């Protein structure tokens, strides 16, 4: 009888170990997916910042060709399939800034409302 109990106990311990291994696998897969999503988000945010920094720099440039290039690029950015609400907000904020500028005059001051969400 001792041999039977030893076999049953060994089987139960093996089953518990297997369940633990499956649980660890599930957790690892979930954490891996979350890490991948976070990495994609950070990459997207970095690229977003680079694109709109370029546009904003030229939109506030002294020369007309720089402002024209910024206008073309901004329009292109908001027509892409991956456009986000942030892209649309930035586009409209730059439109408001451009409307406030006098041609040929560079200004670093904008309306405080340009920085508010909404």
Image: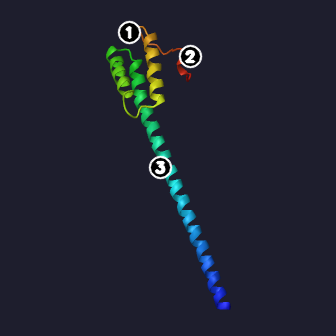
**Residue found 38% across the figure and 24% down from its top:** 74
Q: Position of residue 2 (x, y in %)?
A: 68, 91
Instruction: Quote the CA–CA distance across marks 3 and 2.
Output: 37 Å
Q: CA distance from mark 1 to mark 3?
A: 46 Å
Q: Which is nearer the eye, 63 or 87?
A: 87
Snapshot quadrant of residue 15: bottom right
Q: Which mark is residue 36?
A: 3
10 Å neighbourhood of mark 2: few (<14), some, or many (≥20)?
Answer: few
Residue wearing tag 2: 112
- Frontmost of labels 1 and 3 is 3
Q: Quadrant of residue 26?
A: bottom right
Q: Is residue 44 above or below residue 20?
A: above
- Classify the position of the C terminus by image quarter: top right
Q: Residue at x 47, y 36 (%)?
A: 45
Residue designated by label 1: 104
- 5 vs 41, nearest the viewer: 5
Point out the tag, 1 or 2, that comes first from the N-terminus: 1
Q: Are marks 3 and 2 in contact (CB under 8 Å)?
A: no
Question: Nearer the N terminus, badge 3 or badge 2?
Answer: 3
Specify which label sits upstream in the sequence, 1 or 3: 3
* Residue 86: image location, x then y, percent: 48, 29
Q: Is residue 5 above or below residue 17?
A: below
Q: Secondary structure at mark 2?
A: helix
In-image side of 114 versus 69 (left or right) = right
Relative side of 81 to 11, left or right: left
Tag 3's secondary structure?
helix
How many numbered circles does the render carry? Answer: 3
* Residue at the extreme top of the image, as rendered: 102
Please provide percent x and percent y for residue 36: 47, 49
Q: Secondary structure at mark 1?
A: loop
Q: Residues within 10 Å of mark 3 (few under 14, many from 20)?
A: few
């Amino acid at each position: 009888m001792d041999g039977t109990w030893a076999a049953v106990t060994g089987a139960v311990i093996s089953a518990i170990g297997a369940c633990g291994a499956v649980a660890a696998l599930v957790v690892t897969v979930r954490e891996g997916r979350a890490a991948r999503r976070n990495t994609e988000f950070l990459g997207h945010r970095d690229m977003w910042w680079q694109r709109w920094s370029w546009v904003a720099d030229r939109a506030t440039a002294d020369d007309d060709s720089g402002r024209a290039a910024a206008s073309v690029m901004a329009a292109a950015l908001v027509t892409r399939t991956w456009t986000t609400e942030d892209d649309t907000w930035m586009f409209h904020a730059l439109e408001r800034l451009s409307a406030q500028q006098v041609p040929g005059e560079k200004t670093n001051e904008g309306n405080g409302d340009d920085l508010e969400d909404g």
